[in-house]
Amino acid sequence: MTYKRKNNRKYDELRPMEAKVGVIKRADGSAMFKIGGTTAIAAVYGPRELYPGHLQNPQKGVLRCNYNMLAFSGSGDRVRPGPSRRSKEISLVTENALNPALILDKFDNSVIDVFIEMTNTDAGTRCAGITAASLALADAGIPMKDLVAAVSVGKIKDALVVDLDYDEDSYEEGVDLPVAMMVNSEKITLVQMDGLIKKEEVIQAIKNVKKALKKVHKVQVNALKEKYAK
Amino acid sequence: MKSHFKRIIEKGIREDGRKFDEYRKIKIEQGVSKSAEGSARVMIGETEVIAGVKMSLEKPFPDTEEEGILMVSSELLPLSSPDFEPGPPSIKSIELSRVVDRAIRESKVMDMKKLCVTKGEEVWAVIVDIYPINDSGNLFDAASIAAIAALKDAKIPSVKDGKVDYKKKGTKALPLKKEIPVECTVCLIGNKFLVDPTYKEEEVVEARLTVGTIGKELCAMQKGGSKELTEEQINEMINIAVKKTDELRKHLK
């Protein structure tokens, strides 16, 4: 126990979470997910016709995700508006994280647009975005096999910790490993990692993250219940 | 559908039963984004706009060596409406940010000279970014209130060794006057004037006039929409806007 986390947070402890669905009235589905100082909002539009036509798939609907940080949501300087290499990559891995959970074969030639915006950030934005987007898709009534929950796990000094904040994420020799999972079937849909870490530690980290994801999933389910099970 | 909407408005009925000079419920919340130097969320009915202020130290423009820099920017997020698409700023978002910018700049609400650190070398740049989260109509007025509320919320960040230390929140507010500018957009549909249109009403707006006021004075105007207006109509629209901006200002106290 060499590493001590801020606010005496335990290694396997997530920051306080909050989720709400139906936050954007004009969208077909929407959700907000907050974890510590990171807030993601997601809106779903569709299924609607996909243009240009050559992008259409006659077999099934296409999921299109767009991740973006509001200009004032970064931890330092203003984030320049418009897509960056980083935001494009996150949009792609978000699509891949959500797609396995969706049943889109009834939506041929259509697109389901998911827009994810970060209003303020303290690391873990792609995970918060995926978690919010999954809720928004459920709110939009898109057929799904499962909800997708995401959280990062990492290594600081010798400690394996979940849900890194900005200081932990930017710790020089730290490791950051975001994971998304369909929680009921325990199938993993997103894995990324940066930093140096032993194989055994990765295996342990992924094992640890499952427990954390169940907690995220619970918050998701409660948010849906609050709107639909009253 | 559109002509039906216009017809009932000409009969004196609005879809939600409001009076023609009545705003929906307004809610202002400051400090909604911790990463910004200042921020605010404004709700007008179901319309939601958030604005955030970021500040940085920059070299001043050569023609205003002793003044800070103000920039107002907006992006019509496709998250907020099925009508907005991703991509470079649309003409609609450029107009929105310029109309809000004009009221703030021309009202001289901010003492730009006080934002000078070293003449000709270093000044504070204040950038206001405005985003609709849900567009249920009247983004102009919501954006103008959000921008001002965010500026009022902002604290100048601390500086360490000549560099901005974003981690340490400042305590000093921006040099703002007590009187603040607010904008009201008056819309013409058929032969009726109305304020605070819903997005459905906006579809049938033929002309609009956004008027910014500060104290007893006007500080900015912008006519929109393709229909022409008479002198009498413009006078009437200004009268409505002056009255409504006085009311809107009370929410910002």
Image (cartoon, coloured by chain):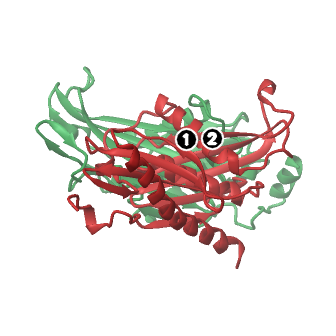
At 39% from the left edge and 53% from the top edge, which residue is drawn? B39
**Residue B246 appears anywhere in the view:** no
Report, in whole angstroms, how far the alpha carbon at label 2 lies from the one at label 1: 13 Å
B213 horizontally vs A174: left or right: right
Q: Is residue B167 left or right of residue A224?
A: left
Q: Nearer the viewer, residue B165 or A9?
A: A9
Measured along the vertical axis of the image, is residue A69 above or below residue A11? above
State the image coordinates of residue B117 (x, y, percent, origin top left). Answer: 15, 36
User: Is A202 in front, or is B132?
Assistant: A202
Q: Identify the residue position indicated by label 2 in the image.
A: A96
Tint of chain A? red
Q: Is residue A214 visible?
A: yes
Q: Position of residue B86 (x, y in %)?
A: 62, 34
**Depth check: B86 or A182 in front?**
A182
- Please state, as top left, top right, bottom left or bottom right, where the N terminus of chain A lies in the image: bottom left
Report which residue position mark 1 lands on. Answer: A67
Subunit bearing disc 2: A
